[in-house]
Every structure is written in C-alpha cells, then in structure tokens.
Image (tube, rainbow, N blue to C red):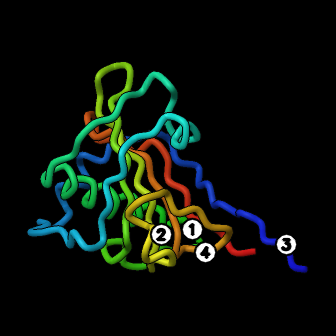
Amino acid sequence: MTQLLLLTLLLPMKQTSVDTELNAVTHIASIDTSKYAVLPFNSGRDGFVFGKEYTAADLNDDEIKHIEKIISVAITEHNKQAKNKVDKPGKYYKQIIAVTNPKGEKEVWVNCFCTPYEKRHWRKGVVMVLDGGPCFFNIKINLSTTTVMSLQVNGVA
C-alpha cells in the first residue's frame, strides 16, 4: 500500500508588510461568495494555527476583499522563487478563520484549494489533505498590520 505524506513547501518567508505591493493590485469589485466559507474559531480544532489566548473575530466584505489582495501579492512573490507555482489564486475556494490576537490585532488563517473535494462539508470544517501540490495552500495574515505571517503550499509525494 502506498503511503501518502504531507509535504509542504515552506519558502524562506519572513513576516513582511505588503502595503506597497497592494497598491499595484487591481481593484477587486466583488467577491464570489460561493467560494468562501468563514468558519468560526474553535480553540480545540484551530490550536495548530492560533494559541489558546486568541478569541473569535468577525469579518466584513471589505476585509475579505483586502485578504484577497494580500493573497494575490503573496502568491506573486511565492511564484517568483518556487517550482511549485500557484495558478490563479482568485479562483480557489477559501476557508477563513478570523481571530483577535492578545495585542487586539485581527489575524486570519486562509485555507485555499482549487476544488471542493468535500462539497457537502467544506463550509463546515477545515479541509486537510495530504500532498495535492499547488492545488492546496494556506496563508496566515495579520490584517491589522497587513503582514503575511506564513504561506505554505502543499507538495507532491
């Protein structure tokens, strides 16, 4: 039996503000809400991303548009140095978990995938996959400081 491994490409990515690059991103007029799911923060389930001292936060439409712009900039930078390139991140399905950190800043973790494998469940729980290549990536963003904290693109076994 073939054993699947979760391979994640972690590029040397320091926490950087993307404010300058955001100015170059074209205006996003609307968001396709059929491809977004905002999941409530659950400290038990989401402990691998956020600490216990984080609390749930809400998102508005403007913040979701801002997230989309930040993802676009981060993926453009990723694709400049990676073999495992992500194509058209705006077309991906996205699960978003929003929190407030202990400093009072809003952070989000966005889980992205090119097709909803679990069509019935992707809006209810975090989709976790093994491998999958650039069809699956996730990004952690501090919205208050416009900082990309991490970007992980799945690998291929």
CB contact under 8 Å: marks 2 and 1: yes
Secondary element under disc 3, as helix, strand or loop, is loop
Residue sticking out furthest to the front? 120
Image point (28%, 36%), residue name? 57
Residue sticking out furthest to the left? 29
User: Identity of the amino acid at label 1?
Assistant: Ala
- Report how far apart the C-alphas of labels 4 and 2 lie in the structure: 13 Å
**Residue 73 drawn above or below residue 30:** above
* Quadrant in the picture for the N terminus: bottom right
Q: Quadrant of residue 82?
A: bottom right
Secondary element under disc 4, as helix, strand or loop, is helix
User: Identity of the amino acid at label 3?
Assistant: Gln
Tag nearer the camera, 4 or 2 = 4
* Quadrant in the picture for the C terminus: bottom right
CB contact under 8 Å: marks 4 and 3: no
CB contact under 8 Å: marks 4 and 2: no
Mark 4: give few (<14), some (14-19) or many (20+) Cα within 10 Å.
many
User: Identity of the amino acid at label 2?
Assistant: Asn
Residue at mark 2: 79
* Res 82 label: 1
Residue at mark 4: 133
